Image (cartoon, rainbow, N blue to C red):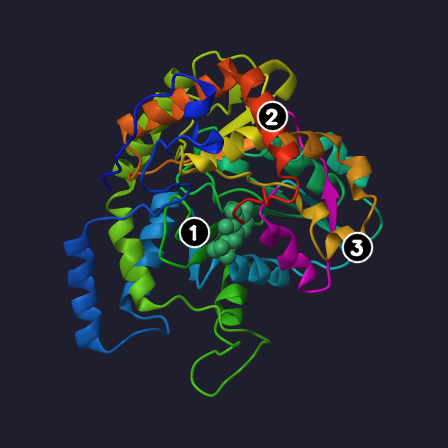
Amino acid sequence: MPTTQSAAKTKAADLAILGGSPAFSEPLHVGRPNVGDWNRFLARVNDLWERRWFTNNGPYVREFEGKLAHFLGVKHCIPVCNGTVAMELAIRALGLSGEVIVPSFTFIATAHALQWQEITPVFCDIDRSSHNLDPKRVEQMITPRTTGIVGVHLWGRPCDVEALSALARRHHLKLLYDAAHAFGCTCRGTMLGNFGEAEVFSFHATKFFNTFEGGAVATNDDTLASKIRLMKNFGFQGYDNVIYIGTNGKMTEISAAMGLTGLENLEESISVNRRNYCAYKRGLGDLPGLEMITYDEGERSNFQYVALEVDEGAAGIGRDQLLALLHAENVLARRYFFPGCHRMEPYRSLFPHAGLLLPETERLARRILSLPNGASVGAADIETICSLIRFAVEHGGDIRRELATRDASRPSQDTSLHG
Ligand SMILES: *Cc1c(COP(=O)(O)O)cnc(C)c1O
């Protein structure tokens, strides 16, 4: 999408937050959907329209299911209506109960999928560099009520799967992964989707690969797979025969048509994301106090997330100031996953002191910022975003002073950000 850009900033007052004109005329979003070929999608929509088969394990869902399993190299990959329901199904089919250990630094659905079934999410701290569960901390959170561990491959970067499976084995715990970010990513050359008892993907529109709404459970366990297949369709085995408690977790044909079209475009989506990620990396260079997440060159990654850690002391500008500054310029960066699940309801009321055991989570939640990526973000956009960030770091002192003066003169101004 063409966005017009205003002239480069030469002094603090040129910034939109201080009254200048925004760098972009249209908002740039994090997670604008990646799409495949429109005509191929349309041809599939035509077919399903003619067929009048819209849901209930139709031909596109079955084709999609086969292609997913083949792509991931996994025995079963069951399409579901969304990632959250896929998590709920996997959790229930695994028979989790009591307490389950999860990171707090994740999207809220990871915790909700447990709490929804009255299983207590026990929030565990993360490793400073990987942003994923710290296995040493996981071990300390195990109690007699613990039945499982849910690891999240945050930003598509794999958890320490070896340490976690050793731990799970030693303590007789079930191991499930929330792989919502990790479609198309590998761990030691094996596609994520093959680890733990099962792994769950999200195909939500903001994710790397989407089916509008959608998700899937991947597993190499035949028994678990057949249980989940029953559970996602009310427990029906054939007509008029319910053999299990279930829900409605079915994916629709139009979502599967979108998925089949997107799969054909996967390599293209990865290379666009990768190109953008590298452009950000070059553009931000070695600015003090800013650190972009890195992806292991030896693995496959989808490069969907351009997450930046802001160290206020070294950068001379805080994460929230940088965020407000970028929003004013129409760069809608996001604070994924601020403030951490433990600081959101119902968990903050249930576990008011959880943060005491989550120092790394709290630290990262204060520092992280996600920048726009995907096919709608071009090289010139990234250059502009990087020069805004460079400018902010170079003029941090001026900007902070100007903002403080303004805040002092307008104390009631609403500085809240988009949700
Ligand atoms: C998006 C997401 C989910 C939920 O997936 P939906 O398809 O939106 O229901 C779960 N976990 C994580 C980490 C996510 O980012």
In the foreground, 387 or 369? 387
Q: Is residue 181 magenta?
A: no
Bin the neighbour count of mark 3 within 10 Å (Cα to Cα): few under 14, some 14-19, many 20 and up.
Answer: few
The residue that disc 1 covers is: 75
The stretch in magenta equals: 106-129
In the foreground, 283 or 80? 283
2 and 3 marks in contact (CB < 8 Å)? no
- Determine whether, in the image, residue 375 is placed left or right of residue 344: left
Q: Amino acid at mark 1?
A: Lys
The residue that disc 3 covers is: 349
Q: Amino acid at mark 3?
A: Ser
The residue that disc 2 covers is: 318
Earlier along the polypeptide chain: callout 1 or callout 3?
1
1 and 3 marks in contact (CB < 8 Å)? no
Q: Is residue 108 magenta?
A: yes
Element type at mark 2? loop
Q: Is residue 163 above or below residue 314?
A: below
Element type at mark 1? loop
Q: Position of residue 320 (x, y in %)?
A: 59, 32
Q: Quadrant of residue 280?
A: top left
In front: label 2 or label 3: 2
Please tell me which residue is depicted at 70% across the width and 30% down the height of the picture.
360
In the foreground, 275 or 72? 275
Please tell me which residue is depicted at 41% across the width and 34% down the height of the picture.
329
Q: Is residue 382 above or below residue 395?
A: below
- In three-dimensional space, the C-alpha distance between marks 2 and 3, rounded to whole angstroms, equals 28 Å
Looking at the rendered image, the quarter that the N terminus falls into is top left
